[in-house]
Amino acid sequence: MSTAGKTIDIPDLINHNKIGSFQIGMLILCGLCVIMDGFDVQAMGYVAPAIIADWHVSKANLGPVFGAGLLGMLVGSLVFSITADKFGRRPVLIGSTIFFALCMLVTPLATTIEQLQLIRFITGLGLGAVMPNAMALAGEYSPLRKKVTLMMLVSCGFTLGAVLGGLLSAALIPAFGWQSVFYVGGVVPLVIGVLMFFLLPESMQFLVLKKRKLDKVAQWLKRIDPTVTITADTQYVVHEKEHKGAPVLQLFTGGRAKMTILLWVINFMNLLNLYFLSNWLPTIAKEAGLSTANAVLAGTALQVGGTIGTLVMGQLIDRSSFRRILLPCFLVAAVAIALIGRPDVSLAFLFITIFIAGFCVVGGQPAVNALAASYYPTTLRSTGIGWSLGVGRIGSIIGPVLGGELIRLNWPNSTIFLVVAIPAIVSAVMVFAMRGGPQTAPAKAAA
């Protein structure tokens, strides 16, 4: 595509070019960052049994440690997403990656539960900043025809990182001790952070709106389309205006209030479901009579379903719309979750329902993240994603706590899973309420 005029439409140029090595490299860096985000978020869960044995503490003592990490991620999502919309995705993504890498390397130095709790909270601050900025940057370099698929692939790295974390922890802990998990979880993102410093571009749309480093914009446009002609008086177009004022307040202006509230509710409900299932499913399955191996496989089936769900739904949404895919997705999730608690079902039936629940709940979360990234304009994109996830992380904290309380009340599994199916129904209702809005169709979403 040759552009000889004095004006270059950046989104149009991206849309009309193939996805080249420059964009692939950027997506790989973002994906690797998200993979280590998932690895490090789940690391505490993998080393918990070893720490309990090593420090001679009870399981209950580690509850606040888990909560501290999630709370740190909540704060990080809220604070650093705003920072990114002011200073850029690149510095925040690189800084947060190096920050949580260093925190992971410090973690093995903890000798008390209180120290571990503090370190996990501080680590969570960096971890919470990764997903909003990786998603925003991936979307801003993706052509519209593949935008949702590519964003969801990057987001899928979180689940992949969690799975890899489990496999590596199983090999590392017996051989080198629980500390080795944190060393790996620190060294690898540190290397990724250095690579990003030299190779990761900033959002071109962001720089144009902020009127910064336009020489860099010219260089990166040349990497996407070598035939483009850029002169000293070339003007760049992004079809957006910079939004003045507090970014969070801007989420409720310009007709965005309804969509913002709907996204917040969906994130809250779906992450409540996701973290309830991730934390309690193996335990409940074991207590229901499954062997330890099958109970672990039940949790694995959930994550496998989520990974496949992410890959499938991304392509479906790119061909259709968020609303047409997410509405039946959450309705099916409600049915699948309710069926998990049915007594006297075959093992095959149980695994199928868990897989479907994972497909819809775990696989649906990247789609919700992509919806936020597609809906909000460039200057609000990180804030929009970050605050949606931040509110959702309240649900991620409540989900495991709620599960513990329901189990403590000795409710039958059938009743517990009926109750847990309700948030999925609420999510479906919220998606239904999006009707009539062009923001739910990728082809009409804000660039």
Image (tube, rainbow, N blue to C red):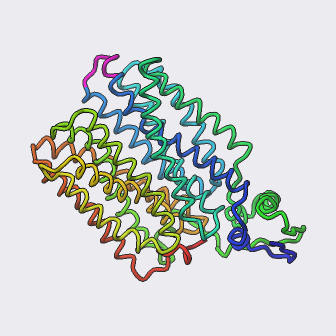
Which quadrant is home to the N terminus?
A: bottom right
Is residue 159 within the magenta segment?
no
Q: Give the image quarter of residue 447.
A: bottom right
Percent coordinates x, y for residue 298 in the rendering:
29, 43
Residue nearest the observer in this picture, 336 or 384: 336
Identify which residue is drawn at 74% across, 74% down: 9
Identify which residue is drawn at 26% across, 44% down: 281
Q: Is residue 154 above or below residue 139?
A: above
Span colored in magenta: 51-58
Q: Of all residues shown, which one is farthest toward the right?
A: 232
Q: Is residue 28 left or right of residue 310?
A: right
Identify which residue is drawn at 35% across, 63% down: 265
**Magenta: predominant secondary structure element?**
helix
Is residue 54 within the magenta segment?
yes
Q: Give the image quarter of residue 362.
A: bottom left
Q: Is residue 51 above or below residue 1?
A: above
Q: Is residue 146 left or right of residue 57?
A: right
Percent coordinates x, y for residue 208 in the rendering:
73, 65
Residue nearest the observer in this picture, 281 or 116: 281
Residue nearest the observer in this picture, 61 or 353: 353
Identify which residue is drawn at 87% across, 75% down: 4
